[in-house]
Image (cartoon, rainbow, N blue to C red):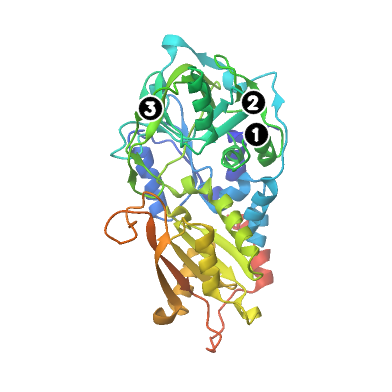
Amino acid sequence: MSKDLRYFLSVVKEAMPWHYIETNKALDPKYEISIFWQKLAKHGFFPTLLCLKIVDRDIPLVTGLLASYHHLGLALGLSFSEIDSQGESIISKRYFDLKNKRISPLRSSFSKVQQISYFDNDIDLLKLPIPLHALLNPAPYITSGIVITKDPETKVINAGIYRIMVTGKKSLLCMILPSHDGYKNALKYAKNAQKMPVAIIIGHHPSIYLASCVPCDRDDSELEIMGAFLDQPVMISQGLTVDLPILSDAEIVIEGLLDPSIMIKDGPFSEGGGYYGEGRDAFPVEVTAITTRREPIYYDINPIHQEHMHFFILDWETNLKNNLGKQFDFIKNIHYGPDGNVGKLLAYISIYKHKHSYVDAKKVGLAALNSHKNIRTVIIVDEDVDVYNQSEVLWALSTRVRGDRDIDILRGCPGLPGNPLGYNDNDTGKGNLDTKIIIDATAPRDVNFPKKVVPQKDLWQSIVLQDYF
């Protein structure tokens, strides 16, 4: 069976029915979808949400394919019972194993996503249920588009997820950061005074999206990485108006020509950190075709929801754990930006402090800050605290921290460019320096702490939640 978006919906519905919602209420793509999704999150509910009716549109919308950490595990082929019995750390281990594997794609004799095609005057992006996410966004944004490009010299195929603003029925603005290979490909086309063919893939199995975010060498095949994450070859077909492979099992494909000779400001954009970001230079794209399944489902990633961060979180966590593991032999687990939009600004790290007399929690915090300059706050906890459960971390913070001894405030650390709180060397203006925090929330060795109340282990592992619903 081909693994696609619909296959994954069935997996979530069966494995975590309490994390799957279908609504027949007609939702307005202008703000309502986004606000409804945010309101669910406000109540601590992070389901996969299938909106069957969208106002003035004929295509349903799904969001939240990777709404929670458990969704990540399901996307990588783990079962709910595996995650529940072995803990969330099994998910990052699975990711680490997959990112170094490769499965070659296969040419498909039948392309589901090309069952219906629109060309010329029949092209109308405004008929897609592309949400307007936030008040200051000037237009709807395609946030789930995997943009396929080709290096004109080496012919290597690249895939990346970029923000794409809709500017008309047949026009887009595609913002690609200069550090990305898609941008480098565009510069090569510009050098030859050529437009760059692009194919924008919308809606597929979420493992495809995770694979698109894996850092890799420029000559590496991201289609092969997708196959590894999908655990089967990705089925590909030829684009109808562009010389590019498209993903046959996708829901929607937008083909077009990107003009690398022109840059236009997009935005402001509602960024994943919860603030509006300034407009960035973006390439205009002229749409040459839209192809879909017979009854497509549009996939939206809300940029101000924690799902947005989940596309990168496993790579951040595995990289940091690998870096710290080279320095310390007592690291248990690492978790970034839990339960919100803080992304890689906040890290929770659990250690085996009481098994070794030489463990220094603050050294771990310093090493973490030196490894990833994006981190602003590190909280170190004991091995009996689950870093994937924010309530447990806050419990340790509230019961094991002595403020005058266990909190270190470090001025003048390298920080993120564009940080509104950043300052220069003299602290007289804006700059890339930052003040960072290390909190040692481990129980001190010199205090006889009472025992933590924990459930009976065997019974805990034997209880399967699905059996109770």
Residue at 67% of width from left, 19% of height from top?
110
Q: Quadrant of the N terminus?
A: top right
Residue at 30% of width from left, 53% of height from top?
430
Residue bearing the label numbered 2: 154
Picture coordinates of residue 440, whole percent (x, y): 49, 74
Which numbered disc flags the more N-terminal residue, 1 or 3? 1
Picture coordinates of residue 102, whole percent (x, y): 72, 38
| Contact check, label 2 and label 1, Cβ < 8 Å | yes
Towards the viewer: 386 or 373: 373
Amino acid tagged 1: Asp
Q: Is residue 258 visible?
A: yes
Residue bearing the label numbered 3: 263
Towards the viewer: 30 or 447: 447
Which numbered disc flags the more N-terminal residue, 3 or 2? 2
Q: Secondary structure at mark 3?
A: loop
Which numbered disc flags the more N-terminal residue, 2 or 1? 2
Amino acid tagged 3: Met
Amino acid tagged 2: Thr
Picture coordinates of residue 20, whole percent (x, y): 52, 45
Q: Secondary structure at mark 2?
A: loop
Residue bearing the label numbered 1: 219
| Contact check, label 1 and label 3, Cβ < 8 Å | no
- Crowding around mark 1 (Cα neighbors within 10 Å: few <14, some 14 to 19, many 20+) is few
Where 355 sits versus 268, above or below? Answer: below
Q: Quadrant of residue 105?
A: top right
